[in-house]
Image (cartoon, helix red, strand yellow):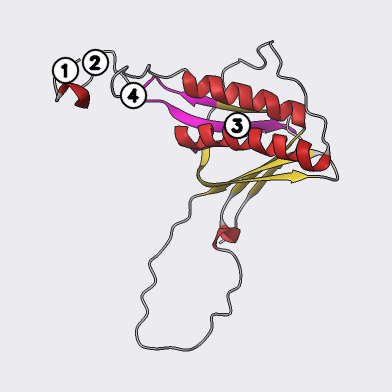
Amino acid sequence: MTHQVHAFEPPERFVAGTVGPPGERTFFLQARGGGRLVSVALEKVQVSLLAEKLEELLTEAQRRFGVDLPELAPVIGDNEPLDTPVDEEFRVGTLGLAFDVDTATVVIEAIATGEVEPEVELGDDDEDDDEDEEPDEDLDRLRVRLTPQATRQFIERARRVVNAGRPPCPLCGQPLDPAGHLCPRHNGYHR
C-alpha cells in the first residue's frame, strides 16, 4: 500500500488548534503552504508533550551546537483559528523530532497510527525474517521543517491551546464540566 508524505519545508503556517467545545475538543496539527492544507488529528497529551519536547530540543541545540535561540516574545503570535476546511488526513500515532545542524532547523514528523495485526507463530521456525524495515515506513506522515523562531511561536500557541480547555478541579485535578463532576475526593458526591 502506498503512503503519503506531506512535506512542508518550510510551511507558510504550522499550528496546533482545536475544533469543538471544551470537553469535546479534537486537537489538530495543521500545516499550510504551496497551496496545500494538511490537518492531522492527535490527542491533547500529544500536543502538550510536543511543546515540552520542542522546548527541550531547542535548549539542547543551543547547548551542543551554539544555535542562537530567539527570546521568548511577550507579543502573542498567531492566534487565528484553524484554516478551513479542517479535514483529518490521518490520526497521529507517533511524533518524531530532530534538529538539522546544517540548516539550523527543527524537523517535526507526525506519523499515522498503524493497523497492527497480531502475529501468531505456530511451531519453532528458525527462519530469520528478511524484513529489516521499520514498521512505520508504510504509514502516512506529515513532515515540517521550522526555524527556531517559528518553533518558539508553535510552542507558545500549543501551550495556549492546551490550557484553554476546562478548568481543573481544585481537589482532584480532573477537568470540571459546566454541570460539575463527581469528585473522588468527596467520595462521589456531585461538586
The image shows residue 31 at horizontal and vertical percentages of: 65, 32
Amino acid, disc 4: Gly
Q: Residue 30 bears which disc, if any? A: 3
CB atoms at circles 2 and 1 under 8 Å apart?
yes
**Of discs 4 and 1, which sits in the foreground?**
4
Dot in front, 1 or 3: 1
Q: Earlier in the sequence, mark 4 or mark 2?
A: 4
The relative height of residue 168 versus residue 132 in the rendered view (above or below) is above
**Amino acid type, mark 2:** Gly
Q: Which quadrant would residue 142 be assigned to in this image?
A: top right
Report the residue at 77% width, 36% height from top.
62
Marks 1 and 3 close (CB-CB < 8 Å): no
Q: Which residue is mark 1?
A: 190
- Tell which of 70 and 178 is nearer to you: 70
Query: Label for residue 173?
Result: 4
Instruction: Name the amino acid type tagged 1.
Output: His
